[in-house]
Image (cartoon, grey):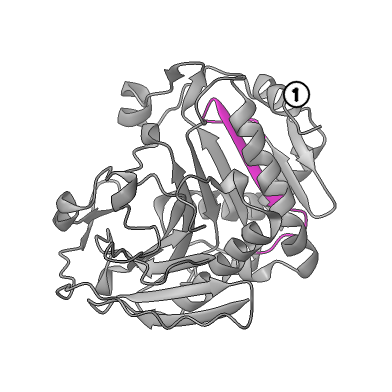
Amino acid sequence: MKKTSTRLADGRELIYYDSRDDTVRDAVDRRPLDRTVTTSEVRRDPLLGDAVAIASHRQGRTYHPPANECPLCPSEGDRLSEIPDSSYDVAVFENRFPSLAGDSGRCEVVCFTSDHDASFAELTEEQAGLVLDAWTDRTAELSHLPSVEQVFCFENRGAEIGVTLGHPHGQIYAYPFTTPRTALMLRSLAAHKEATGGENLFDAVLESELADERVVLETEHWVAFVPYAAHWPYEVHLYPRRRVPDLLGLDEGARTEFPKVYLELLKRFDRIFGEGEPPTPYIAAWHQAPFGTLEEFDGVVRDDFALHLELFTIRRTSGKLKFLAGSESGMSVFINDVPPETAAQRLREVASS
């Protein structure tokens, strides 16, 4: 992998990740852009204890542009985009309309391919491996920023999810705090460790799932399963067999095997609802240990956390979506229409031949 860092016209960082070491990236952003001004602010809810990002400047962000005006496609002639070069393998840049910025963290866009009409599932294993390298590198780099406590790599796919740009891409949020979801896991981890005299909860969950009927796919280095208490109609958790706290901890075997495993899961998601159905909308989210102190979680250290990827869709059946209604949105109590065992069986049925 070759990494080339440059700057866009307004000062934001742009990084190219290329599979060839001899690739040269010297294109200049020719757009007449003013320096980006953001109004990002993090406020803490005194009752719930969680954080809310206030980012009013995002009201003006790009919204469903036509394909010939896509800001994530390579620049061509007089059509100038966020990517100055005429082609790229993987490109990462600071979001022009970030939810978090400055002392409140950082947001980046990850372009998986220059092909506007592709999807992650259509990438080659080499391309998917390069994306993994980019996620890992950005996790390492962002963890060194003084304002950053946790790094979150994710992809939102599909208009039903709320995606406003059709080009295959994901995002990275670098939070200045430990997210509420992760804090819940750490509290459960601490309680289980104390109650069992040191047993790791993630290890116990993985062992339990391996013995059950919800395993979807397993290889030498990875295990994918529908969790016992799945929140979403079709939800898969992907774990490396060897527990590591973040992407940086993956060994060569797991890194080499990941593209094939992940691409297979994405292809199965597109087959869940049968032939002729539109692409399945999904969210794919990497859960990594925070880089900040864990003192508030008694007895827990970073290495207790288990890196894993959560992949789920809000489509519950053909033509119908799972909306977060009163119980889910108002009380955070999910009601799942699809039994996890049924979802796992369906995901096994649609495996590649």
Q: Is residue 48 left or right of residue 87?
A: left
Give the extent of the magenta segment.
226-244
Q: Residue 50, how many percent across, how many down?
A: 31, 52
* Image quadrant containing the N terminus: bottom right
Q: Is residue 164 left or right of residue 5?
A: left
Within the image, what quadrant is residue 100 found in?
Answer: bottom left
* Label 1: which secondary element: helix
Main SS of residues in magenta:
loop
Question: Which residue is located at x 80 percent, y 43 percent?
Answer: 218
Q: In front: 127, or 114?
A: 114
Q: Is residue 130 left or right of residue 119?
A: right
Residue that extends furthest to the front in the rendered view of this protein: 77
Q: Residue 289, how many percent across, how many down?
A: 54, 63
On the question of residue 49 being in view, the answer is: no
Q: Hey, what amino acid is under mark 1? A: Glu
Q: In front: 244, or 32?
A: 32
Vertically, is 41 above or below 220? below
**Does the stretch in magenta take in 100?**
no
Question: Which residue is located at x 54 percent, y 72 percent?
Answer: 17
**Circle 1 residue:** 349
Circle 1 residues within 10 Å: few <14, some 14–19, many ≥20: some
Within the image, what quadrant is residue 105 found in?
Answer: bottom left
